């Protein structure tokens, strides 16, 4: 148990150093009170290895969802660190594919959007800002549109902040 407390205290020291390195930084610290350590022990976590594996098990579902868009339907409570490492490696490779596909879709959406702007500018003999306003006005969404760039960008498959950067 003292190994676990020493691990947490070392992690907290690194966090304090990181916090001191710059303003507006925030992070949480490990609770090393006897009560917190006793809670971990009650959950069967008494070593650094058990803590790391528990954290990996807790993180797995979120990581899987980030990659696949839905939570896994598998019980990881008995998985070993090696099995988790293997699965995290797989998810990392899958995430690279997902990110590449997202970037490709985004590029296609930008090209299509810019084509629509150019066509609107030519048809109406108007500037870019007016063309975007017209495109925004033409979008019908049953009253759900909130009028912000964020929603308009999302509904057109554009990256968040695109309109501000492209202005």
Image: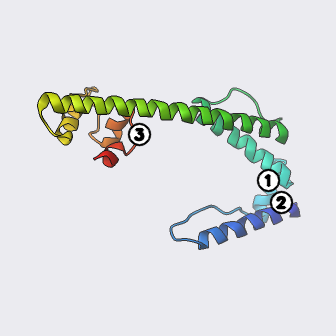
Q: Is residue 147 above or below residue 143?
A: below
Q: Earlier in the sequence, mark 3 or mark 1?
A: 1
In percent of width and height, residue 52 lies at 79, 50
In percent of width and height, residue 141 lies at 28, 27
Q: Earlier in the sequence, mark 1 or mark 2?
A: 2
In percent of width and height, residue 124 lies at 12, 30
In the picture, residue 96 is in which quadrant?
top right
Given residues 115 and 43, the one toward you in this image is: 115
Given residues 121 and 4, the one toward you in this image is: 121
Please, what secondary structure does the residue beneath circle 2 have?
A: helix
Residue indicated by mark 2? 4
Q: Residues within 10 Å of mark 1 (few under 14, many from 20)?
A: some
Residue plotted at (73% across, 64% down): 11
Residue indicated by mark 1? 40
In the picture, residue 137 is in which quadrant?
top left
Q: Are the residues tagged 2 and 3 within 8 Å (C-beta)?
A: no
Nearer to us: label 1 or label 2: 2
Q: CA distance from mark 1 to mark 2?
A: 10 Å
Residue indicated by mark 3? 159
Numbered mark located on residue 5 in the image: none
């Amino acid at each position: 148990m003292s190994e676990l407390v020493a691990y947490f205290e070392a992690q907290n020291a690194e966090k304090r150093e990181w916090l001191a390195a710059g303003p507006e930084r925030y992070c949480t610290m490990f609770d090393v009170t006897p009560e917190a350590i006793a809670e971990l022990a009650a959950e069967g976590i008494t070593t650094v290895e058990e803590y790391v594996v528990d954290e990996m098990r807790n993180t797995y579902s979120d990581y899987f969802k980030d990659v696949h868009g839905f939570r896994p339907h598998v019980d990881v409570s008995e998985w070993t660190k090696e099995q988790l490492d293997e699965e995290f490696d797989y998810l990392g490779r899958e995430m690279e594919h997902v990110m590449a596909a997202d970037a490709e879709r985004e590029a296609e959406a930008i090209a299509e959007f810019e084509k629509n702007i150019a066509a609107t500018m030519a048809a109406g003999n108007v500037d870019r800002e007016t063309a975007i306003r017209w495109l925004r006005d033409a979008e019908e969404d049953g009253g759900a549109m909130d009028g912000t760039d964020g929603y308009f960008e999302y509904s057109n498959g554009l990256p968040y902040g695109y309109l501000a950067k492209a202005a």
